[in-house]
Amino acid sequence: MPDILVYAEVQKGEIKKGAFEIASKAKALGGQVSACIIGKGVEGLAGELGKYGADKIYVVDGPEFENYLTEPYVQALAHVAGLVNPSIIFLSASAQGKDLTPALAARLKVGALSDCVELSLEGDKVIAKRPMFAGKAYATVEALGSPQVISIRPNSLGVEEIAGAGAVEKVDVNLDTSKIKAVVKSVEVRESEEPDQTEAEIIVSGGRGMEGAENFRLLEELARAFGPTATVGASRAAVDAGWIDHGYQIGQTGKTVSPNLYIAAGISGAIQHLAGMNTSKVIVAINKDPEAPIFSKADYGVVGDLFEILPKLTEEIKKIKGQ
């Protein structure tokens, strides 16, 4: 059975859901599962990974890791990989993971499989499925070198509590500061009670058909009705119009998401948008144009005026939830 190393990303003082997802998947594949957590003041978080399959958690904790920067983090993760000697390394394909994955693979002189949505094991080798050509096709891929460095699209595999031994070991890393060519001066994070779009179970998105910033309250009300696992998204047209912040954008030039439920209101379904959400488990489209391309991808389609449909849908969800 393979030895697997999982990188557990920390954001806002918490381990991201994507880390639990890849840890539980690693445990399901069998073999020894190690995890690596990097940051400042993160040692107290490490034990939580044991609930999701980590047999051993390596903690790299220090002030030099307070803010993410590629070079220090890749040095730290490569150091832990040298201790574990894994045949597989999993990372989440978050914004940070998309930066760290190729950097780690280059440091270890191996290839990388990025943004995978399905995994299977043949011997000690992972066979992965990943979208290509803006989601219009899927490729089955295998990394020939060792370790295999693989990033997994958040929400693709699901989270399962599979207890591992959960032993914690702190690791000291002597950074080669001569290779660090940048410094983080400040980090500006949008304050929100909503989950990040990449980890949300439900996303209610609006496009050009919303007709203005003031109408996005309809989406916000529906998301609140669904509960704390839901959030709002947007198409590029809505973002470019200045109706909502770029941080909400879903698509080829925004975030790539895989929620359990994706509601597209007033979104025509351009290929750039579909590339960011076509791996959603269930897609519901609301559009007054019956010929809108989004209907070809939707599991359920509603042809009608979203300004009438969204409030009624919100009302029905509240009834179901007992609100």
Image: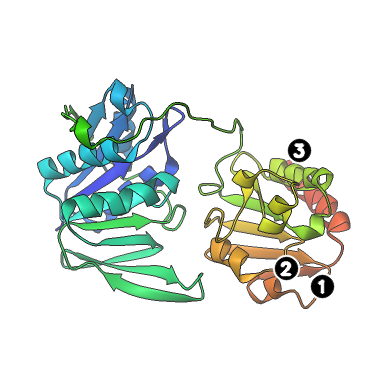
Per the image, the residue denoted by label 2 is: 268
- The answer to whether one can see residue 57 in this image is no
Identify which residue is drawn at 37% across, 56% down: 152
* Type of colouring: rainbow
Q: In terms of sequence position, does the residue under pointer 1 or pointer 3 come before the other?
A: 1
Q: Are marks 1 and 3 in contact (CB under 8 Å)?
A: no
Q: CA distance from mark 2 to mark 3?
A: 32 Å
Q: In terms of sequence position, does the residue under pointer 2 or pointer 1 come before the other?
A: 2
- In this image, 308 relative to 188: left or right? right
- The answer to whether one can see residue 238 in this image is yes
Per the image, the residue denoted by label 3 is: 323
Task: Check disc 2 and give the amino acid type.
Answer: Ser
Where is residue 162? Give x, y as percent. Answer: 31, 45
Q: CA distance from mark 2 to mark 1?
A: 8 Å
The image shows residue 66, relative to residue 31, as above or below, that is above
Identify which residue is drawn at 20% across, 50% down: 107
Per the image, the residue denoted by label 1 is: 289
Q: Secondary structure at mark 2?
A: loop
Q: Closest to the observer: 160 or 67?
A: 67
Q: Between label 2 and label 3, give the one nearer the viewer.
A: 2
Quadrant (top left/top right/bottom left/bottom right) for the N terminus: bottom left
- In this image, 229 relative to 122: left or right? right
Q: Are marks 2 and 1 in contact (CB under 8 Å)?
A: yes
Where is residue 309? Give x, y as percent. Answer: 84, 58
Q: Secondary structure at mark 3?
A: loop
Q: Secondary structure at mark 1?
A: loop
Quadrant (top left/top right/bottom left/bottom right) for the C terminus: top right
Task: Answer few, some or many: residues within 10 Å of disc 1's Cα (few below 14, many 20 plus, some between 14 and 19).
Answer: some
Q: Are marks 2 and 3 in contact (CB under 8 Å)?
A: no
Task: Answer few, some or many: residues within 10 Å of disc 2's Cα (few below 14, many 20 plus, some between 14 and 19).
Answer: many
Task: Check disc 1 and give the amino acid type.
Answer: Asp
